[in-house]
Image: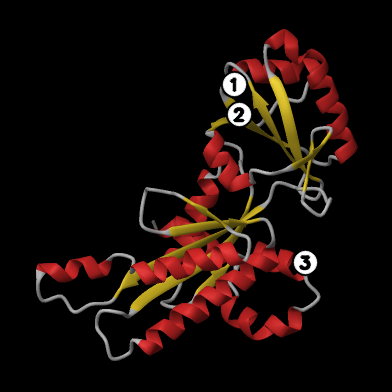
Amino acid sequence: MPLFMDFHQFESITVEDVKKAHIADISVQEKFGVKYHQFWVNEDSGSVFCLVEGPDPKTCELCHQVAHGNIACNIQEVEPGFFNLLMGEKQFIDHGLTLKHDGSIDNGNRILLVADIRGITFLDNARHFRKLTIPIRAKKSVLDTLDLFGGRFVEHSSDDNLIGVFESAVHAVQCVLKIQHDLSDSNLKNLNRDDGRIVFRLSIYKCQPLHHSDGFFERAIQSAKRMCLITPANQISVSANLMDLFKMETDAVDSYKIQFHQLGFSEADEHFPAKAV
């Protein structure tokens, strides 16, 4: 059967509230031919995401309605492989509640890293057009660094951007700083060559899987790409909400204050691309 994720928004919600609703779902799901697998709770924002197998969205919604009356704001079919890349394949589930590897509650938030890399060349014949694509060595460097910091590479064929996903803000920031350092260092080493230099833009963006009307991570990926689009050459942009999360996750903020100064990206800047495009 197809796999769906739904999104609920509450003024206030607790993990215990959602556990009770999940038990109610399980008690009636056989009547509707659906199966509720797990859920994510963000008590701070009042967001809840449920993963369910079912014949169609309406049947899944009907199960919710009969079980506890809470109707989702949005429900979208998800492709299992894409779901595993964005949310993680090996998850810990405690009676439906999704947990992180350290046993803390997984609130469903993810951090997207977008890298836009282009080769620099002085075009004088058609053979040089290939240098405008992502240089192989630069791409390998980015992918290796993603893996080093626990990020997952997300295949997204709509353009040449490289996309990674993280569950930790600290790992995402450490990763993007290393990518910037390595790519800048590569440019210095190839300063006198016209076939090895690149121009790059990097962005990291905190997001959630669904909102009220978009597809699975659709709005998140578009926003992260738009941030990357307006980032100055060879620099990094970081969403304001990610900066706040990073400060919550680490006690070593002072060691990053120089990078924070150059990374800072206001909420007004985050929304600017959407207005400009």
| Relative horizontal placement of residue 215, taking residue 42 as reference (left or right) | left
Residue drawn at point x = 38 percent, y = 84 percent? 187
Q: Crowdedness of circle 2 by 10 Å Cα count: few (<14), some, many (20+)?
A: many
Res 57 label: 1
Residue drawn at point x = 79 percent, y = 21 percent? 25
- Where is residue 249? Give x, y as percent: 77, 66
Which numbered disc flags the more N-terminal residue, 3 or 1?
A: 1
Nearer mark to the viewer, of 3 and 1: 3
Q: Quadrant of residue 188?
A: bottom left
Q: Crowdedness of circle 1 by 10 Å Cα count: few (<14), some, many (20+)?
A: some
- Where is residue 126? Give x, y as percent: 11, 67
Task: From this view, report whether residue 191 is shown above or below residue 121.
Answer: below
Q: Amino acid at mark 3?
A: Glu
Distance from label 3 to label 1 (Cα)? 36 Å
- Where is residue 231? Give x, y as percent: 46, 71
Residue placed under numbered mark 2 in the picture: 4
Res 249 label: 3
| Relative horizontal placement of residue 160, taking residue 61 as reference (left or right) | left
| Relative horizontal placement of residue 214, taking residue 127 as reference (left or right) | right
Q: Secondary structure at mark 2?
A: strand
Which numbered disc flags the more N-terminal residue, 2 or 3?
A: 2
Q: Secondary structure at mark 3?
A: helix
The answer to whether marks 2 and 1 mark residues whose Cβ atoms lie closer than 8 Å is yes
Q: Crowdedness of circle 3 by 10 Å Cα count: few (<14), some, many (20+)?
A: few
Q: Amino acid at mark 1?
A: Pro
Nearer mark to the viewer, of 2 and 1: 2
Task: From this view, report whether residue 109 is shown above or below residue 49.
Answer: below
